[in-house]
Image: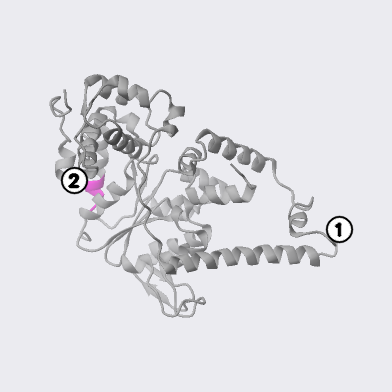
C-alpha cells in the first residue's frame, strides 16, 4: 500500500506556506512566524540541526513587506574567521593587496530586504560588535573604511547552540543576545512531531523519484512505523538523505519494515549507509585568494610567537632547537580540558570512520571549527 493510498496529505501549512506537516507544535510555530513577519523585529530561530531553520526564515521574509527584495542566507560557520567581516560588510579599495576596487558585503546586498545569519553562535566576538551596531542604528564600517555605511536590512538569525550558556562563558555578547531575541522561534525536533514523518516520507520520495529519474517508492505500514520509531539525530535533513538513498538502492520495490530495519539496525551503523554525494559549488578566485590571506595571517602569528620566544631574556636557551622543539617546549602548558577535548574529537571521528561532517554534527560544532581543532591537536586518522 502506498502512502497516497493511506490517505496522508502534506497538510494545510504546506498548501499555504510550503511548510510540510500538520502537527500541533509545527502549527504553533507557523502561527508565530505569520504574526511577526509583517514587523521589522529581529527573530532568533533556534532548534536542532536539520529542523528547517532556513525554511522558516524564508517564510518570514515572504510574508513581510520586504518580500519583493532580496533574501540572503549566510552560514556563519562556513566562512573562515578572518574573512567573515569582509563577507558581511565588504571592503574599500586598497584595504588589502588584491582589493583593487571596493566591494559590497552581504548587508549592503540585503538592503531593503532580509539577511539570514545561520549558525550565529560561530560569529567571532569582534564581528559581534559590528553586528550589534547594525542592529542598533543600521550603520557599519567596511573593512579598510573610514566612514559609516547606512543600510536597511532585517536580520533573522538561527542557531543550534545554547546561546545563554555561551553568554555565561563569555563567548557570546549578552547585549547582542538580547537584541537578537526580540522574538524567538523554537523549532521542534522530528521526535517531537512523529505524526509528520509519513508526510515527509511522501514528499521526499516523490522529489527523489523525479531527481534521480526512478520510480517512486511504495512504503507499507510497517516501514512507516519503523521510521517513526527511529531517532533521527539529523532530523528532517537526515530523513531526506535516507529517502534519497532508498530511492536509489531500493528502486522498483515495495519498502517493507524489514528493508528499513536492514538500513537502520542501530544508530551506530547509520554512518555506514550509502550516501548521495552532492557536488560542492566551486569557490570563486576572490574567495580563494582571501583564504590564502588568512593562512598568511596565521603564519605571521606563528612567526611572531617564535620571535617572541627567542627575544625573551628569561626563556631557557633554545640554540639548535627547531621550530617543532620550540612550539612543544615546556613553556607551553596544555590545559587538561583540552586533552579531554582532543580525545572526544578523536573518538567521535573514529566512531564515524573519519566522516567529518557527521562528527561535527555529533560534537555540535561547525565543520570549520572541527577542521581547526584537528589541526590544533595534530589528529591523524
Q: What range of the chain is rendered magenta?
A: 33-38
Q: Position of residue 258 (x, y in %)?
A: 31, 19
Residue at left 43%, top 69%? 286
User: How much space separates mark 1 and mark 2, taking CA atoms?
Assistant: 68 Å
**Looking at the image, residue 1 lies above or below residue 349:** above
Q: Quadrant of residue 46?
A: top left
Residue at left 34%, top 40%? 237
Q: Position of residue 227 (x, y in %)?
A: 31, 26
In terms of depth relative to the viewer, which is nearer, 1 or 172? 1
Q: Position of residue 347 (x, y in %)?
A: 58, 35
To which residue does mark 2 refer? 17
Is 232 on the left or on the right of 346, as rendered? left
Q: Is residue 152 visible?
A: no
Label 2: element kind: helix
Q: How many marks?
A: 2
To which residue does mark 1 refer? 316
Q: Position of residue 23 (x, y in %)?
A: 23, 31
Q: Is residue 72 visible?
A: yes
Question: Per the image, is 160 magenta?
Answer: no
Residue at left 45%, top 53%? 77
Which is nearer the N-term, disc 1 or disc 2? 2
Q: Quadrant of residue 196?
A: top left
Amino acid at each position: 500500500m502506498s502512502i497516497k493510498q493511506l490517505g496522508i496529505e502534506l497538510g494545510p501549512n504546506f498548501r499555504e506556506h510550503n511548510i510540510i506537516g500538520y502537527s500541533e507544535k509545527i502549527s504553533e510555530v507557523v502561527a508565530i512566524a505569520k504574526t511577526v513577519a509583517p514587523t521589522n523585529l529581529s527573530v532568533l530561530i533556534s532548534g536542532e540541526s536539520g529542523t528547517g531553520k532556513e525554511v522558516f526564515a524564508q517564510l518570514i521574509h515572504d510574508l513581510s513587506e520586504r518580500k519583493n527584495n532580496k533574501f540572503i542566507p549566510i552560514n556563519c560557520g562556513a566562512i573562515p574567521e578572518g574573512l567573515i567581516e569582509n563577507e558581511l560588510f565588504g571592503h574599500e579599495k586598497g584595504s588589502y593587496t588584491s582589493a583593487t576596487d571596493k566591494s559590497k558585503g552581504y548587508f549592503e546586498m540585503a538592503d531593503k530586504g532580509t539577511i539570514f545569519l545561520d549558525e550565529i553562535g560561530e560569529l567571532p566576538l569582534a564581528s559581534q560588535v559590528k553586528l550589534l551596531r547594525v542592529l542598533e542604528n543600521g550603520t557599519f564600517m567596511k573593512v579598510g573604511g573610514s566612514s559609516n555605511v547606512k543600510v536597511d536590512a532585517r536580520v533573522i538569525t538561527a542557531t543550534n547552540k545554547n546561546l545563554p550558556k555561551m553568554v555565561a562563558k563569555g563567548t557570546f555578547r549578552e547585549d547582542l543576545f538580547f537584541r537578537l531575541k526580540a522574538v524567538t522561534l523554537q523549532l521542534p525536533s522530528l521526535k517531537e512531531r512523529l505524526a509528520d514523518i509519513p508526510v515527509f516520507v511522501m514528499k521526499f520520495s516523490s522529489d527523489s523519484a523525479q531527481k534521480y529519474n526512478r520510480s517512486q517508492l511504495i512504503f507499507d505500514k510497517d516501514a512507516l512505523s519503523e521510521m517513526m520509531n527511529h531517532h533521527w539525530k539529523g532530523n528532517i535533513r537526515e530523513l531526506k538523505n535516507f529517502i534519497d538513498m532508498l530511492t536509489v538502492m531500493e528502486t522498483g520495490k515495495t519498502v517493507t519494515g524489514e528493508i528499513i530495519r536492514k538500513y537502520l539496525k542501530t544508530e551506530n551503523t547509520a554512518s555506514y549507509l550509502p550516501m548521495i554525494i552532492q557536488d560542492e559549488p566551486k569557490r570563486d578566485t576572490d574567495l580563494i585568494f582571501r583564504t590564502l590571506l588568512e593562512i598568511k595571517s596565521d603564519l605571521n602569528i606563528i612567526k611572531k610567537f617564535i620571535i617572541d620566544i627567542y627575544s625573551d631574556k628569561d626563556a631557557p636557551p633554545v640554540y639548535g632547537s627547531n621550530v617543532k622543539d620550540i612550539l612543544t617546549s615546556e613553556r607551553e602548558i596544555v590545559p587538561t580540558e583540552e586533552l579531554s577535548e582532543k580525545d572526544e574529537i578523536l573518538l567521535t571521528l573514529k566512531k564515524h570512520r573519519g566522516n567529518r561532517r557527521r562528527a561535527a554534527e555529533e560534537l555540535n560544532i561547525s565543520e570549520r571549527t572541527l577542521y581547526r581543532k584537528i589541526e590544533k591537536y595534530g589528529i591523524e586518522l
